[in-house]
Image: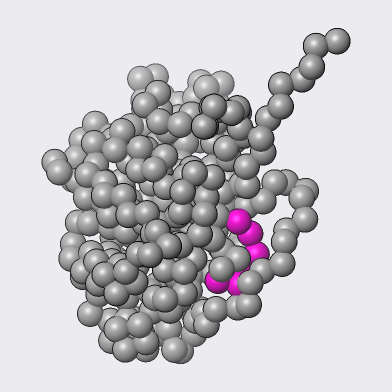
Amino acid sequence: MKPRTALLLLPLACALAAGAPEGAAAPAAALVGWDSDESAERFARSAHRKDFFPLSNHFVSQDNKIFCGPVSSAIVLNALRLGRKKGLPQDEQSIAEDERAWLPKGFNPFFGKYTPGNVLNERTKSRVEVLGKPIRIGGKRVRDFGLQLRQLAGVLGAHGLDVTVRVVGNDADAGAIRREIARNLATSDDYVLVNYARKSLGQPGGGHISPLGAYDAASDSFLIMDVNPNRAPWVWVKADDLIAAMRTFDTVENRGYLLISDPG
């Protein structure tokens, strides 16, 4: 009998493996829910919320436990391009081919837009690799669920966006991170995606990816527009707590954030 090839199972991004017990969450960070009076006050006085409006207009949530990266990518791509550019990709998964037989001949029912189903392509990590098909990392075959920070950058770069990768190292300057992200949120046509560990914020789950929508200087907090409302709502989180949640190890290096714009 041939020996089985050993596969290293890496922690799931966005969620733990189906059916596996989740580890205890860290002590809860001071999270403020989006639907609270305090949240309304923070948003009203924020001078760093330009990104919120286009992101919310194009916001979609996850429909599975793994695709926080593709969902976040689709939101940002649509915020930058939908209604501005022609020839956007079409996702034909929403209407089965046999169902289209009832449509008028020659009629195309699909909009050009980015979706979690079409942001992955031959230049990115594939759909089945995101779902766990083994890939080679560091000389080993591993089941690398979801998207690591640089893999996420690769998805956005494959669609022609300018992407700056910021790995939050153990000695990273929290003040510089806070200022850079806040500047981005105060300007139009550029966005921030964060890759962080939920447990560091006292939330259940593993690594997660979502866009940031605003920064409130008075409370020194960022608004996470969580793409998985099944698990956690949109929340304001203290800047230091979010930075600590990004300063966590993921497979090959620490997590972090991406600064994203469209050069075209």
The number of callouts visible is 0
Whether 59 is drawn above or below 98: the answer is: below
Relative side of 189 to 199, left or right: left
Q: Quadrant of residue 171?
A: bottom left
Specify the quadrant that holds the C terminus: top left
**In the rendering, at what x and y percent does residue 112 appear?**
32, 36
Mark yes or no: residue 247 visible: yes
Quarter of the N terminus within the rendering: top right
Dominant SS of magenta comes to: loop
Residue 57 visible (yes or no): no
Q: Residue furthest right?
A: 1
Q: What residue do we see at 66% from left, 35% from top? A: 8
Above or below residue 132? Residue 106 is above
Image coordinates for residue 16, horizontal then vertical, percent:
67, 51
Q: Is residue 91 magenta?
A: no
Residue in front for this viewpoint, 33 or 151? 151
Give the camera-side residue of 240 and 159: 240
Where residue 60 appears, as percent x and y from the top left, is 45, 54
Say which quarter of the image contains residue 23. Answer: bottom right
Q: Residue placed at 26% from the left, 70% from the top?
A: 176
Q: How is the image coloured?
A: one colour
Q: Which residues are magenta?
A: 201-206
Q: Residue at x 15, y 43 (%)?
A: 263
Residue 205: say if magenta: yes
The residue sitting at the front extreme is: 171
Extreme-top residue of the structure: 1
Q: Looking at the image, which residue is at 62% across and 42% down?
A: 10
Q: Position of residue 138 (x, y in %)?
A: 52, 32
Considering depth in this image, is 2 or 230 the residue closer to the camera? 2
